[in-house]
């Protein structure tokens, strides 16, 4: 490399141009990513305001006549209020149960040594990478039949809580960042193992609980197969995802895609509210990572 190249590389104007080019590339990448992410949502929103004939025939992105009545019809046909309550109950119970079970498991694994600890962590990790799907659906249903929970949402709740491996590892990482000296100081002050967990350690885990709770809530909210199977004999317990699928065909056996899109837009609103409430936890996690 000659002296002229070195002098150009170290010139302030050259450095500013490189930084400006890097920013342009970054913003272009973010814009394209946001566009690809939001495009399906915009398509669904536009489709929910079209008639079924216009939607099925294609045409422009924006509707020719804005059909706001689609939302009222979707609300009426799906019993939206009842199904939304079922989904909120299911998702909230799964979130609370998952956080409680995963937090206690992660705390014990991080703070205690016991026989089979490595095996337990390995089994938890294997459940994240091996998806058996519908293979275990029949055994799960048979188990809930023996527990007399096959006709309620509690069977679905217990099954979804048992799938807490991802939450376990997320919280395990947060526990490793909490000094062990806090546990030792609590023990010296007379706190038991469980009391120090609930009164001292758990409040410090608020950012991790917020992020993990959001993921658990979203997973339970979007679950379809389990609520479908467990509510076949009791349609009043159907969740919103199952109810929206029932909009596929109307009384004339024609596909009601416009109503499905309207119902999908309505079903997004509770998740948006949860994301807004959990945004503070994401900010705390980001701030903590920067300080660390």
Image: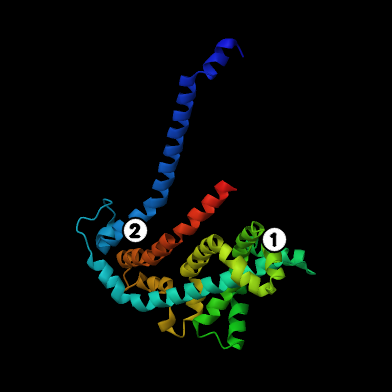
**What secondary structure is marked by label 1?**
helix
Of label 2 and label 1, which has the lower sequence position?
Answer: 2
Name of the residue lying farthest toward the top: 3
Q: Which mark is residue 231?
A: none
In front of the other: 74 or 82: 82
Q: Position of residue 265 (x, y in %)?
A: 34, 63
> Which residue is most to the right?
115
- Residue shown at 38% from the left, 71% from the top: 244
Q: Residue at x 21, y 59 (%)?
A: 66
Q: From the viewer's side, name the closer residue of 215 and 241.
A: 215
Q: Which mark is residue 181?
A: 1
Q: Is residue 46 above or below residue 159?
A: above
Rendering coords of residue 81 (x, y %): 34, 76
Distance in Å between CA atoms under marks 2 and 1 = 52 Å
Q: Is 95 placed left or right of 101 in the picture?
A: left
Instruction: Choose between 270 and 19: the one closer to the eye.
Output: 19
Rendered location of residue 38, percent (x, y): 38, 51
Question: Which residue is the site of mark 2?
Answer: 44
As drawn, the residue found furthest toward the left would be 65
Q: Residues within 10 Å of mark 2 (few under 14, many from 20)?
A: some
Query: Vertically, is 51 above or below 98?
Result: above
């Amino acid at each position: 490399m000659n002296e002229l190249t070195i002098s150009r590389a170290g010139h302030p104007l050259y450095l500013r141009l490189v930084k400006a080019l890097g920013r342009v590339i970054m913003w272009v990448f973010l814009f394209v990513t946001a566009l690809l992410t939001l495009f399906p949502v915009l398509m669904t929103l536009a489709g929910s305001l079209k008639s079924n004939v216009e939607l099925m025939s294609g045409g422009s992105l924006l509707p020719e006549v804005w059909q706001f009545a689609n939302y009222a019809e979707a609300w009426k046909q799906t019993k939206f209020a009842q199904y939304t309550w079922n989904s909120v109950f299911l998702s909230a119970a799964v979130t609370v149960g998952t956080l409680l079970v995963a937090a206690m498991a992660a705390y014990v694994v991080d703070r205690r040594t016991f026989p089979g600890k490595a095996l337990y962590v390995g089994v938890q990790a294997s459940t994240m990478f091996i998806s058996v799907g519908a293979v275990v659906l029949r055994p799960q249903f048979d188990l809930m039949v023996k527990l007399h929970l096959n006709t309620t949402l509690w069977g679905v709740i217990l099954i979804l809580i048992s799938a807490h491996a991802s939450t376990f590892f997320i919280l395990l990482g947060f526990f490793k960042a909490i000094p062990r000296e806090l546990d030792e100081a609590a023990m010296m002050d007379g706190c038991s193992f469980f009391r120090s967990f609930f009164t001292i350690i758990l409040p410090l885990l608020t950012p991790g609980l917020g992020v993990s709770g959001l993921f658990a809530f979203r997973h339970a909210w979007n679950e379809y197969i389990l609520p479908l199977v467990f509510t076949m004999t009791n349609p009043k317990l159907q969740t919103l995802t199952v109810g929206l699928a029932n909009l596929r065909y109307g009384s004339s056996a024609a596909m009601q895609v416009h109503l499905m899109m309207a119902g999908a837009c309505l079903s997004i609103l509770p998740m948006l509210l949860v994301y807004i409430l959990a945004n503070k936890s994401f900010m705390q996690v980001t701030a903590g990572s920067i300080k660390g």
